[in-house]
Image (cartoon, rainbow, N blue to C red):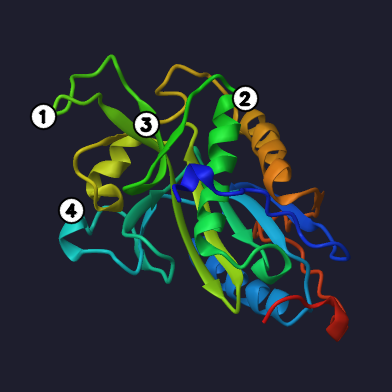
Amino acid sequence: MQRNEIDLSLHAAPGFAPAELAISDGLVDYAAASAFMEARVAAIADGRANELIWFLEHPPLYTAGTSADPKDLIDPERFPVYATGRGGEYTYHGPGQRVVYVMLDLKRRKQDVRAFVAALESVIINTLEQMNVRGERREDRVGVWVRRPEKPRLPDGSMSEDKIAALGIRLRRWVSFHGLSLNVDPDLSHFTGIVPCGITAYGVTSLVDLGLLVMMSDVDVRLKRAIEDVFGAVVPVPVDPVSGLPSENVLSPAPASAATGG
């Protein structure tokens, strides 16, 4: 079955609280964000915290996924490089890119990794569609792509395509972390320090590069709508104005009857 044929509705089973949504202003330190995710995922898995979807931006940096090839790090001195447990290879994060960390308990939704990846791609595709941009998935490469007919064709004669959004996830006890990144208006030259996702045949683009003069807040409204279509309603929560980290909302341990799956 192709990813575009998968049932992409991953709403939580009845009886569970909606996921929380945090939106951070400013640039959030990567190490602090990673530590927060680790703690929050453990709390979600233990039934001590609600699920969380987190919108943020990072200072310029590169991350290496579990499949990263060292030769794809072209300029290791350019920005900090962080090893991470997510799937995938090298990617860039920086100002003007909307990063979305998705901490969801798939035991409450659907214990299907492939469906989860397809659902995240659908969130991006639906977000872009609201701005009259056609994003597409490809069976041989993860992420979301846009066709560039104005660019020279590829050596095999096919149309040029650029990547507008990347995905990389990790699951622990069926709770997800890491997530996706959508290029709104990052400095695209920063991608030249790596081979993004290990793919050399295609370029990288952004909404502004495609001619859409949008603000991050405009994108967030559409992104939230797309997330709710796929994952169900979300509840806004505050963030710390200094660190940019979401507020902690630790719950009492959930009753055994609330758990689904194994």
Question: Residue placed farthest to the front in the image?
Answer: 1
Q: Is 211 situated above or below 105?
A: above
Q: In which quarter of the image is residue 214?
A: top right
Tag on residue 130?
2
Question: Mark 4 vs mark 2: which is more N-terminal?
Answer: 4
CA distance separating discs 1 and 2: 32 Å
Image coordinates for residue 82, horizontal then vertical, percent: 37, 66
Q: In which quarter of the image is residue 165?
A: top left
Image coordinates for residue 213, horizontal then vertical, percent: 53, 19
Image coordinates for residue 193, horizontal then vertical, percent: 24, 48
Tag on residue 74?
4
Residues packed near mark 3 inside 10 Å, few (<14), some (14 to 19) or many (20 plus): many
Q: Name the residue under label 3.
A: 205
Q: Report the number of discs.
A: 4
Query: Is the Cβ of the residue at disc 1 closer than 8 Å to that at disc 2?
Result: no
Question: Mark 3 vs mark 2: which is more N-terminal?
Answer: 2
Q: Which of 191 and 136 is in front in this view?
A: 136
